[in-house]
Image (cartoon, rainbow, N blue to C red):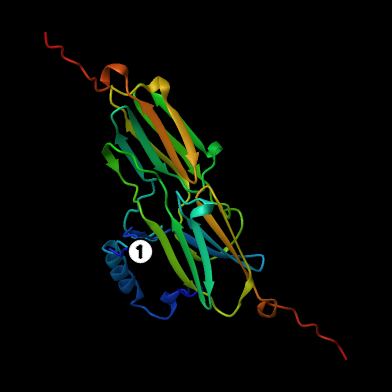
Amino acid sequence: MAKNETNERRVLPARYNIFNEDGKVFLEMEMPGVSKDNLEIKVDGNHFMVNGRKTIGNISGKFRLHEIKDGDYQHIFTLDDTIDRDKIEASVKNGIVTVTLGIKESEKPRKIKITAK
Amino acid sequence: MAIVKWKNRDLYEPWEGFRSLQDEINELFDIDRTPAPSGLFDRNLSPAVDVVEGDQNFTIRCELPGLDQNDLDLSVVSNVLTIKGEKKDRNKEKQTAYFKKECWSGSFQRTISLPNSADTEKISAVLKDGILSIELPKKEEAKPKQISVKIS
């Protein structure tokens, strides 16, 4: 199992959706237990990194059911040249991180006018 | 991982079905990845739950990302706690082009039988950052007691 080098916490995959809407690419990631302060989103060249520290709090006692995994969410995506690096926005609500990636104007489909002669 | 649209590979490769079967089986042993929401094998389409018994109370946690207070229905009927809810797909009505879809949506229900020592009258629940925390204090008679013994 992959471990985070710095703090020995487990690295968890987050479920995510990627879809195209209104000329933008949306990335929705399910990160329960991640608040705004514990989320780090970085763009480094072609790499888009999302790190979320899951804080569910420590409870002492006997676990009768233990299905929730503790750890940190880590994902690295590769951005291609169609994404405008200046048009990346992110928000987090109810444990869902939504990243909006704008597509460069030059890459959008456009209509070519035909002039009749 | 590059953002590349999926293709219907079956069109070009007649044996693709077997390869995807192999992928499905490999995926079962792949712990680091989240399994796809649909496929050959049953997916766990219910939220993860923790039940912790402490000295003074029971804590029940449930992972519910993307759920609002209004999407949830909590009920206790004679020591059976039911967490019911619906995870909505916000793009359901629209024909959205998905590049990748791992998140599931739909209704779910989890029932947890509570022990007799739990005081269901004093239940409280908080939903924060996609995690629901339910606190149930123990009944007074079930709490550990310190009995001091006097030596005369």
What's the residue at 36%, 55% (across, down)? A71
Q: Which residue is mark 1?
A: A6
Count the numbered circles shown. 1
Please provide percent x and percent y for residue B76.
40, 25
Answer with the quarter of the image where residue B96 lies. bottom right
In-image side of A117 versus B126 (left or right): right
Q: Which sits in the foreground, B80 or B56? A: B56
* Residue found farthest to the front: B152
Expressed as whole percent of the image width and height from the top left, the position of residue B105 reads: 48, 50
Residue at position x 53%, y 78% in the image:
A45
Query: Disc 1 residue type?
Result: Thr
Image-based side of B31 in relation to A113, left or right: left
- In the displayed structure, would residue A83 be above or below residue B57? below
Chain at numbered mark 1: A
Q: Position of residue A107 (x, y in %)?
A: 66, 79
Residue drawn at the location 46% of the way across and 62% of the way down? A51
Q: In the image as oriented, which residue stretches furthest toward the top?
A: B152
Q: Secondary structure at mark 1?
A: loop
Instruction: Kindly give the residue lying farthest to the bottom in the view shown.
Output: A117
> Residue B91 location in percent, x, y?
58, 55
Q: Residue at x 75, y 79 (%)?
A: A111
Location of the N terminus of chain B by quadrant is bottom left
Choose between B114 and B134: the one closer to the eye. Answer: B134
